[in-house]
Amino acid sequence: MPVTIRDVAREAGVSITTVSRALNGGEDVGPQTRERILEVAQRLRYRPSHVARSLVRQQTESVGILVSDFNKDSGGHHFMFDVLAGIHDQLSEYGYDVVLMSTNTARQRMVSYVDFCTERRLEGVVVMGLRLDDPYFSELVDSPLPTVAIDLPVLSEHCGYVMSDNINGAKFAVKHLLSKGHRKIAFVNGHQQAAVSLDRLRGYQEAMWAAGITDLSNLVINSDFTYEGGVEATQQLLHQCPDVTAVFYASDLMAIGGMKGLSLAGRRVPDDVAVVGFDNIDLGAIVTPALTTVGQRRYPMGQTAVSMLYSMLRDGDAPTGRLLAPELVVRSST
Amino acid sequence: MPVTIRDVAREAGVSITTVSRALNGGEDVGPQTRERILEVAQRLRYRPSHVARSLVRQQTESVGILVSDFNKDSGGHHFMFDVLAGIHDQLSEYGYDVVLMSTNTARQRMVSYVDFCTERRLEGVVVMGLRLDDPYFSELVDSPLPTVAIDLPVLSEHCGYVMSDNINGAKFAVKHLLSKGHRKIAFVNGHQQAAVSLDRLRGYQEAMWAAGITDLSNLVINSDFTYEGGVEATQQLLHQCPDVTAVFYASDLMAIGGMKGLSLAGRRVPDDVAVVGFDNIDLGAIVTPALTTVGQRRYPMGQTAVSMLYSMLRDGDAPTGRLLAPELVVRSST
DNA sequence: CTGTTAGCGCATTCAA
DNA sequence: TTGAATGCGCTAACAG
């Protein structure tokens, strides 16, 4: 239906080869001819078929973004959205098309991620929001398809990853609390299926140990990253360890829930109990008191993932694990 | 590089024609042959090239999602993300691929949206987050490319739209306030480039007029949908109309900012001043007091847009304007 | 400098 | 029931 290269060729009175050359900036085309072709192409609003070009060149110049179930995720919205933006923008900077897919896309079509990508001849994938135990994920990791994962520390021949330096991020938080004189510092973690949870726990532990605080029993509670989880975990924490003076939460949402829980229990923030979160979501600046938190650089994270993928695609570079420095944002909750 | 239909044909000792038929469920294939072909295809992990298929069938089975600049938008995150999820999920339900593009993708590549879509042979587009005055948008609307816009009431031969019934949504809010006995009800609107702003204003006005309140001067203020905007607008409002007893904000973010502003001014919510927002973002349930708001059904909005696009694509249906009913969520701020 | 030829991987006539 | 031939729109050798 659309205008093809043939139409342009006929109208300009040349062969399609010449049209192709003229439009692709080939050297060997007469200036007059070129000009005429360009004029005709523009007049006819000719747009080369990306599909046909992909077929003959054997490369689609497009990569997939694989996201875990869109709607089931609540709370991770901000994180995912910003990272997605970074991925998209950087990709289109490099001239790549972006094909969106989610874990349930594949499920619906009854094909694995790898098969989906193979069919579309995607040149690479960026993965985000997946859990370590996703059944299809390992297949992706083992496949020759260039892959970069966000927040999943898996490294293989064709798969690299990008994530915040969660260990040091957690250390920043704890050290900040220690510097304020706190000793009884509790930690409310996210769910255990997330790789980041392990790192944040480790950072917390190491910072505490380094300060000579070795008995962490009753100070660590596992929750689920959500607001409600933060409320509940805090109540449990207050029960099993009433003399805490500070709590470090593995997410801002939990921290905000935590402040609610503390308030319900009659504790004042930051006077009775100091609070630190993780993520630096917009909301943290709005709540009262404003939340001290460890910020993740979400948009750059997306960009970084893509630039790594690009170097794999273009230069055949080996994938790496790349850690982004988090930043402590001190506000009034501490 | 990947396995092609040829490889399967050779391995199975048949022609590629037969392979094609067998794999596409053609009737006229011997049961034995079919089985053998299926077995071979599976063993070789053959995946038909979506690219080649698109070329020969002259349809790509993929649609584009056009989003305004990803990173410049702050605050609309939730809205965009949920709608995006709805769009994506429904699209993949129908078997369509999803190509993501943003306004700056096109700008970077120096082509209009239409050209971008034409090159990729996208069959349709869903547009979201664009402003009415976007330079390229009208081109899209006028083009023969099937299009559905979110929150942009433009209707043309090939362009339909989906949005919340903002007029009635605003009426719900105002009527709720009226029923609580309020008369001095102010309205803080979003920026004027958004179509929704006009509708919400109109709903507010009509509801007030219907209640016999005709003098709305000093009661309406224009802001920008943001938290900060809400704070400032509220201060201004309190200045020019100190005796307001209720404020309806055109976004939850502004409403939350407004509650902050009210608190700063020593007014209590809801005792001194009642507050209603618009959007029903998660945050609204978390703040204190919890925010009464007009909820938009974001995920269904995305789904609806796609089902409309699908009927246009598949059945040649004419595009329509579809309004989704909003819902009043009453919480403690009123 | 330009045109002819040959595919890319697949679906689809038309014959056999 | 199967296969050979044709072409989707385009690029890239190879000639001229």
Image: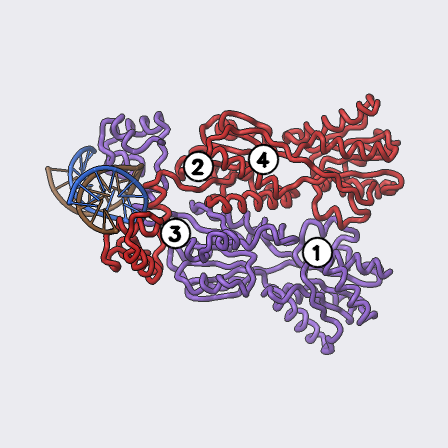
Chain colours: A purple, B red, C blue, D brown
Identity of the amino acid at label 4?
Answer: Ile
Pair 1/2: label in front? 2
Neighbor class of circle 4 (other Cα within 10 Å; few <14, some 14-19, many 20+) is many
Q: Can you tell which mark lies on residue A253?
A: 1
Q: Are marks 3 and 2 on the same chain?
A: no
Residue B48 position, x and y percent, is 35, 51
Residue at the image point whose x is 42% and y is 65% from the top: A157
How crowded is the residue under tag 2: few (<14 C-alpha within 10 Å), some, or many (20+)? many
Q: CA gap, disc 1 to disc 2?
A: 40 Å
Residue drawn at x 71%, y 50% is: A283
Amino acid type, label 3: Glu
Q: Chain of mark 2?
A: B
Q: Which residue is mark 4?
A: B150
| Whole-percent x, y for residue A142 in the image | 43, 65
Q: Which residue is mark 2?
A: B123
B29 or A141: nearer the viewer: B29
Q: Nearer the viewer, residue B253 or B45?
A: B45
The answer to whether the residue labelled 3 contacts the one labelled 1, judged by CB atoms less than 8 Å apart, is no
The reply to the same-chain question for discs 3 and 1 is yes
* Disc 2 residue type (three-letter): Glu
